[in-house]
């Protein structure tokens, strides 16, 4: 497959995400940034909640603006999107799996996966303590934090909601589904994050956020590269426009810029303790 963006540019995009966030917030005085880097220590729960919010924004944007609007333009999305004979993009859950795979290949010890009590893939069925805590999440949608004694990892579970029609339709109609009455706003499962340490420095928190951002870049670029190999499907034009405008897909920089605009201030407020 033809590479749309070479590895050096991929690395550059992922590494500048945090600097873009700083610019979106109007910049941070150098003295305050240095002080924060030297002194700020976050609990693991705080950092996992930060990255979870970044994930919520990214996945919602991908689900609504790419998958939902893309389907209206005739674009296809499939769980077997990586197979040579399938000309499609990743469904939202597979997009998340791609991000998790990218993170796992890096040097940041951050774990990420989806689970549910009604999963399409039985391997994602919640078990044990997570199944018990998920019952609480379904009732109040509040995150659950605990230490996994077996894996020796600090763990955080967050509600994974049916945030778009594309989620509901796909799950209700899937041939392997065990539940066919999903509705918008339902808690479909949980996004689970894990990390070995109980606290992180400012720099380590940035690394966690950057690992997630890089995973987003890697997976989205993999999708765009897949499009280049299409032989029997109309290829969308990749540039500055979105599927809502026609048979278009945003290039990685445009997609990430939209994520940045939606999430940057909240993340930096947490990182630098703005009041």
Image: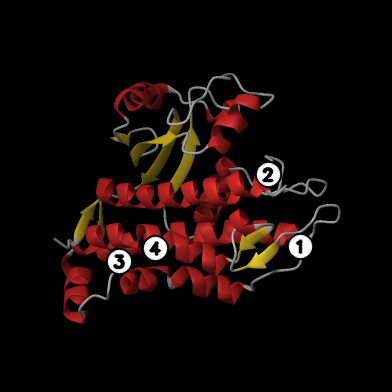
Q: Is residue 162 left or right of residue 202?
A: right
Residue 109, image x, y percentages: 41, 53
Please indicate, yes or no, whether residue 110 appears anywhere in the rendered image. Answer: no
**Above or below, 251 relative to 97:** below
Residue positioned 50% across, 75% down in the render:
12
Q: Reading the chain from its start, which is encountered first: label 3 or label 2? A: 2
Kindly identify which residue carries mark 4: 261
Mark 3, secondary structure of its residue = helix
Image quadrant holding the C terminus, namely bottom left
CA separation, marks 4 and 2? Answer: 26 Å
Kindly identify which residue carries mark 3: 203
Between 52 and 140, the one lying in front of the other is 140
Q: Is residue 124 left or right of residue 22?
A: right
Residue at far left of view: 275
Q: Residue 271 sits in which quadrant?
A: bottom left
Q: What is the count of numbered marks?
A: 4
Look at discs 3 and 2 and give the one toward the viewer: 2
Residue 34, image x, y percentages: 20, 76
Kindly identify which residue carries mark 2: 77
Residue positioned 36% across, 73% down in the render:
19
CA separation, marks 1 and 3? Answer: 37 Å
Mark 2, secondary structure of its residue = loop
**Above or below, 156 relative to 4:** above
CA separation, marks 4 and 1? Answer: 28 Å
Kindly identify which residue carries mark 1: 228
Mark 4, secondary structure of its residue = helix
């Amino acid at each position: 497959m033809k590479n749309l963006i070479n590895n050096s540019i991929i690395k550059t995009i992922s590494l500048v995400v945090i600097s873009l966030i700083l610019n979106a917030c109007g910049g941070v005085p150098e003295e305050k940034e240095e002080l924060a880097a030297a002194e700020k220590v976050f609990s693991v729960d705080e950092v996992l909640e930060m990255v979870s919010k970044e994930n919520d924004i990214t996945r919602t944007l991908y689900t609504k603006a790419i998958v939902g609007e893309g389907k209206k333009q005739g674009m296809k999305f499939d769980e077997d999107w990586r197979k040579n004979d399938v000309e499609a993009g990743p469904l939202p859950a597979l997009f998340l799996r791609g991000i998790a795979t990218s993170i796992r290949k890096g040097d940041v010890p951050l774990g990420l996966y989806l689970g549910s009590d009604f999963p399409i893939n039985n391997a994602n069925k919640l078990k044990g303590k997570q199944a018990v805590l998920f019952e609480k999440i379904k009732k109040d949608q509040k995150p659950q934090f605990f230490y996994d004694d077996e894996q020796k990892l600090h763990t955080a579970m967050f509600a994974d909601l049916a945030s778009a029609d594309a989620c509901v339709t796909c799950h209700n109609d899937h041939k392997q589904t065990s539940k066919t009455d999903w509705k918008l706003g339902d808690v479909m499962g949980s996004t689970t994050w894990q990390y070995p340490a109980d606290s992180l420095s400012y720099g380590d928190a940035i690394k966690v956020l950057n690992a997630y951002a890089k995973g987003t870049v890697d997976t989205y670029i993999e999708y765009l590269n897949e499009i280049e190999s299409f032989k029997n499907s109309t290829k969308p034009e990749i540039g500055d426009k979105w599927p809502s405008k026609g048979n278009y897909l945003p290039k990685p920089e445009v997609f990430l810029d939209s994520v940045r605009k939606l999430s940057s201030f909240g993340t930096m407020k947490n990182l630098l303790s703005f009041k």
